[in-house]
Amino acid sequence: MTNPEEEKVIPPTPFEGGKEKKSLNFIEAKVEEDLANGKNGGRVQTRFPPEPNGYLHIGHAKAICLDFGIAAAHGGVCNLRFDDTNPTKENMEYVDAIKEDIQWLGYQWGNEYYASDYFQQLWDFAIELIKRGKAYIDEQSSEEIAAQKGTPTQPGIESPYRNRPVEESLDLFNKMNNGEIGEGKMVLRAKIDMANPNMHFRDPIIYRVVDTPHHRTGTKWHAYPMYDFAHGESDYFEGVTHSLCTLEFVVHRPLYDLFIDWLKEIRGEGDNLDDNRPRQTEFNKLNLNYILLSKRNLLVLVNEGLVSGWDDPRMPTICGFRRRGYTPSSIHKFIDKIGYTTYDALNDFALMESAIREDLNATATRVAAVVNPVKLVITNYPEGQIEEMEAINNPEDETAGSHKIAFGRELWIEKEDFMEDAPKKYFRMTPGNEVRLKNAYIVKCTGCKKDENGEVVEVYAEYDPDTKSGLPGANRKVKGTIHWVSCERCLEAEVRMYDRLWKVENPRDELARLQNEGKTSLEAMKEMMNPNSLEVRPVCYVEEYLADAKPLDHFQFQRIGYFTVDKDSTEGHLVFNRTVALKDTWAKTM
Ligand code: ATP
Ligand code: MG
């Protein structure tokens, strides 16, 4: 555990997008105003506070970019704090994965904190509250307590235990913590106001019993603080100045402030309650069409085997996007595009796709890959001859250079690039028509061979030797250009094409609707899932240049889309993931 006094300053984000001077979002504006007013002694300190109960998703990336970005932009520090107050759902695998994902996004936290490091301080605070008559042990069941809460317009009912003697509460609180009281038998509640219009003030539960050992503190504790009792105090202990969170916490803010008031008062830290304390500001959660977020939901997908794991390339997790071929800078670009507001929205996933296309268009090496192969034989090309053709790596980047691609008599081309009876505007392979083979020759289609079912098994063409790429004859006008790979000099590859995981535009709301009808999460998810979200093409052909490609290398398969090597690749068996199609994913490209 690092010392809170030793705060390191994080380096500014390495991504171009973060350096552009843009109009400030409302949170940045607030931070600048605080700085201008000399608040917090000119300090800016934020935190990113994930609960280690799953892998981070793209929604978290939005929070991360803000928490780390604000600190970096103002010479401040952003710490990582694991909100580990619920041992039943948390573990170290998640802690490690969260750290890896934040770093992959390009950020480095100042200190690594855990809410569990504050269990003693929180316990002491709770004891003090009991002593001051501000908290009591309730022995009712959670159902009874909920039934007494009232409604926003109707006051709640006070618990029969509300005014029990302090000594009794102290004794029972100790018993809760030393394992003498079973889970759900007793809770500690703050004594605030059962008639308050804010439901969170109606004697909120601040401690409960959990018997599962904690991933860091083992069996030392049995009484664990609730989120509302741990979060604000943790911010305060660390010296957070700006505590940024999502809109559902707006209604929790008065309680956040109240607990910090009480804490400051008890500790005698500053007469001015407004001084030197964290302030919570809320922004809208990311919600994307055709994407379901929330770790709780994603855990169901993983546990029930509806996807292959947290990093299944169809998952909206950071590691899923990474494996799918998204880059950190594309995620930054996307987050920049959608911005931060104070109202709930449903963003278009197309924005995410255009961000990754923009990024890979500038950086991905262009290669030839045939994902639905049929053989093309160039009947007038010498048998056994191979020519090395020059292929430009990236027309968007002169410095990217070129590589060689082998050309021969037999080539693989896409089935869709040949039609025996083609309509007028079909400019690809059709008998009598000329077409350019990318980086090679102009060829004229002469016919095809079909099997007994009428399936085309071979296409024939003749080449014109004067039209080799780079020669003057190559300038002859032909309307179509198609890609190809040499049959003799290519590699076999498996290509995985992905489609939306969900059929419905707003899976979050649809899931809630189906659950309201009494369906379990699993039943609802099965109903909502797109049965065609993964299409495996087991036999594709790619040029030899890809032999040494490594997982997370990015390529443009010309005319098809952007692809990355999957971690399932082995020597001799390349596997590619389609990151995104060249234009619109939903317009069938191939
Ligand atoms: P989940 O439901 O996915 O578990 P959470 O809010 O419970 O989300 P935490 O791990 O507690 O997740 O959150 C860490 C931070 O990320 C919080 O500040 C939270 O507000 C933020 N966050 C979570 N989901 C989103 C989202 N969809 N958009 C923006 N920020 C989010
Ligand atoms: Mg949560």
Image (cartoon, helix red, strand yellow):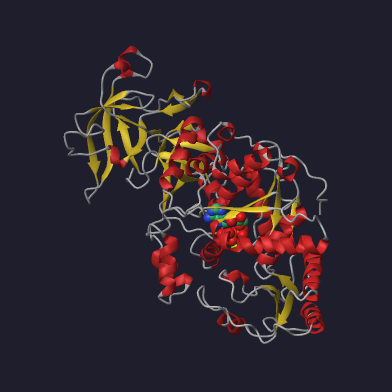
- Return the residue nearer the eye: 555 or 536: 555
* 563 vs 21: above or below: below
- Return the residue nearer the eye: 209 or 325: 209
Residue 571: % across, % down = 57, 44
Q: Is residue 136 left or right of residue 344?
A: right
Name of the residue lying farthest toward the front: 271
Q: Is residue 15 left or right of residue 558?
A: right
Residue 94 visible from this viewpoint: yes
Q: Which residue is drawn at the image coordinates 79% and 56% (left, top)? A: 271
Q: Is residue 539 left or right of residue 216?
A: left
Of the four image quadrants, the one with ligand 1 is bottom right
Q: Which residue is drawn at the image coordinates 49% and 24% (left, top)? A: 397
Q: Which residue is drawn at the image coordinates 73% and 40% (left, top)? A: 42
Quarter-of-image position of residue 428: top left
Q: How many marks?
A: 0
Name of the residue lying farthest toward the top: 472
* 362 vs 110: above or below: above
- Return the residue nearer the eye: 496 or 50: 50
- Return the residue nearer the eye: 87 or 144: 144
Residue 525: % across, % down = 44, 66
Residue 141: % across, % down = 63, 84
Q: Is residue 469 left or right of residue 341?
A: left
Name of the residue lying farthest toward the bottom: 160
Residue 13: % across, % down = 64, 37
Residue 91 visible from this viewpoint: no
Q: Quadrant of the C terminus?
A: top left
Q: Quadrant of the N terminus?
A: bottom right
